[in-house]
Image (tube, rainbow, N blue to C red):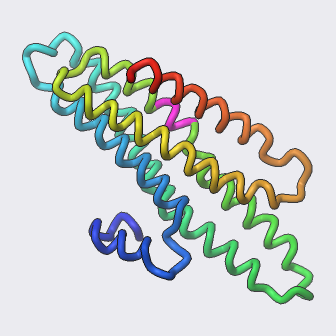
Amino acid sequence: MIKDHTVGSYLDALASGAATPGGGAAAALTVAQAAALISMACNFTLGRAAFGTQALEVERLNVVSEGVRSLALMATQEDVVAFERLKAAYGLPQNDPTRQEALQQALKTAALVPAQLFRPMEELVEAAVRLRAICNPNLVSDIDVALSLLRGAAGGLRFIANANLDRVEEPNFGSDVKADMHRFEMAIQDTSNEHW
C-alpha cells in the first residue's frame, strides 16, 4: 500500500522501472498533500483567540479537507490496482474470447479512478478559498501552495483519465466525465488568477 511507504521508498518505487506507482498515483497523492496543507491552515487557526469567532466555520472546512485527503489517499492505491488490472487484460492472448471485454472494462476503471477525484477537489478548492479569507494570515501562503498543487494535480489526473477514455470503444462513454474535468480545470485556473 502506498500509504505505508516512507517518502523515500515511495519515490524510489515511483522512479523505478516498475509500472506502478505511476502518474495517476502521483497526481492523487498531490491532491492528498493539498488537502493536508489546508488542514494545516485550519489547525493553525483553531484555538487561537484572535480567530475564535470563525471556529465553527474553520472546523467545517477542516472536515472537508480531511475527507478529501482520505479519498485521495485511497485513490493512490486504487490507481495502482486499476493499472495492474489493465496490464493483465493486455496480457491475455489475442485469441482469448474474454480479452476484449476485459480490456474495455479495465480501461473504463482506469479512467474513472482519477476522474472520481474532480468533484472532491472542487469541494476542496471552495474550502480553500473560504479559509483563505478567515484563517490565520500566516497560513495564506500555504493555502496558495495547496491551490497550486490542485491545479497541477487536475492536469495530471485529466491526462491519465483521457489516455484511457480515448481507448474505450463504447460511444459517448465518459463524455460527462470529460466535461466535468474541463469545467474544474477552468475553475481552478480562475481561482489561481484571482489570487496570484
Is residue 110 on the magenta stretch?
Answer: no
Q: Residue at x 79, y 55 (%)?
A: 166
Q: Residue at x 10, y 14 (%)?
A: 50
Q: For this view, does 80 lie left or right of residue 3?
A: right
Q: For this view, does 43 lie left or right of residue 69?
A: left
Residue 121, x across and y down, in percent: 50, 37
Is residue 120 on the magenta stretch?
Answer: yes
The segment highlighted magenta reads 119-123
The residue positioned farthest toward the left in the image shown: 49
Q: Quadrant of the N terminus?
A: bottom left
Q: For this view, does 139 lie left or right of residue 11?
A: left
Q: Residue at x 21, y 19 (%)?
A: 55
Q: Quadrant of residue 111?
A: bottom right
Q: Quadrant of residue 135?
A: top left
Taking depth in this image into account, of 115 and 142 the one nearest to the observer is: 142
Taking depth in this image into account, of 126 and 194 the one nearest to the observer is: 194
Residue 70, x across and y down, in percent: 40, 49
Residue 22, x across and y down, in percent: 52, 67
Residue 120 vs 113, above or below: the answer is: above
Q: Main secondary structure of the magenta part?
A: helix
Residue 6, x across and y down, in percent: 27, 69
Taking depth in this image into account, of 133 and 149 the one nearest to the observer is: 149
